[in-house]
Amino acid sequence: MADPASVPKRRAATRWDVLAVIGAGGALGSLARCGLSAAVPRSRGEFPLSTFATNVSGCLLIGVLMAVVTGATSPHRLLRPFLGVGVLGGYTTFSTYTTETLDLVTTGHPFTGLSYAAGSVVAALVAVLIGGEATRAWLNRTGAKP
């Protein structure tokens, strides 16, 4: 084990610029999620299509973002916090997903609730994979440098 005295001390200063872009991105992402939810309303007991679409499309975009960021030679240091943590973190919603699943299961719609729970996880993982792989393929085919 390394001697604690030999380990470099972490920078104690808060990175206010990073917190600011995360906050701004989160506000934008949350507004987009709210807009999609208002555009595709649902009644109790129905499959939560707007939350499903939000989470799956957000995961697709996370795959795209990570392919761009990891393929870039020197991405701007605020790109990932703004888009990944901020915008897409505010856009996607695990809390609504779990609340809607619980509501479906406890109000007499267990099949819909469990289908929603499992289908969301599978679709989100597939979306991340597709977003990342499709973006990498496009970048390689076009010779574009992110």
Image (tube, grey):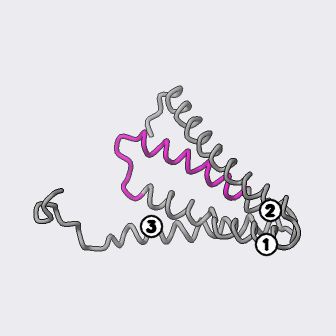
Q: Which residue is mark 2?
A: 113
* Magenta stretch encompasses residue 59: yes
Is residue 80 one of those drawn in magenta?
A: no
The residue singled out by tag 1 in the image is 103
Q: Which mark is residue 21?
A: 3
As measured in the structure, the alpha-carbon distance from the residue carrying label 2 to the one carrying label 1 is: 8 Å
Quadrant for the C terminus in the image: top left
Comparing 115 with 84, the one in front is 115
Amino acid type of disc 2? Gly
For the residues marked 3 and 2, what is the alpha-carbon distance in whole angstroms?
35 Å
Helix, strand, or loop for circle 3?
Answer: helix
Q: Position of residue 100 (x, y in %)?
A: 75, 69
Q: Secondary structure at mark 2?
A: helix
**Which numbered disc, 1 or 3, marks the residue closer to the eye?**
1
65 sits left or right of 118 in the view: left
Establish if 54 lies above or below 65. Answer: below
- Marking on residue 52: none
Answer with mark 3 or mark 2, whichever residue precedes in sequence. Answer: 3
Badge 3: residue crowd in 10 Å (few <14, some 14–19, many ≥20):
many
Query: Which residue is at 62% across, 63% downward?
Result: 91
User: In the image, which residues are magenta?
Assistant: 53-78
The correct choice, above or below, for 78 with respect to 125 in the image is: below
At x 24%, y 73%, the residue is: 12
Q: Amino acid at mark 3?
A: Val
Q: CA distance from mark 1 to mark 3?
A: 34 Å
Please name which of the two marks, 3 or 2, marks the residue nearer to the observer: 2
Q: Mark 2 near mark 1, Cβ–Cβ under 8 Å? A: yes
Secondary structure mostly taken by the magenta-highlighted segment of the chain: helix
Quadrant where the N terminus is found in the figure: bottom left
Q: Decide which of tag 2 and tag 1 comes sooner along the chain.
A: 1
Q: Which badge, 1 or 3, comes first in the chain's sequence?
A: 3
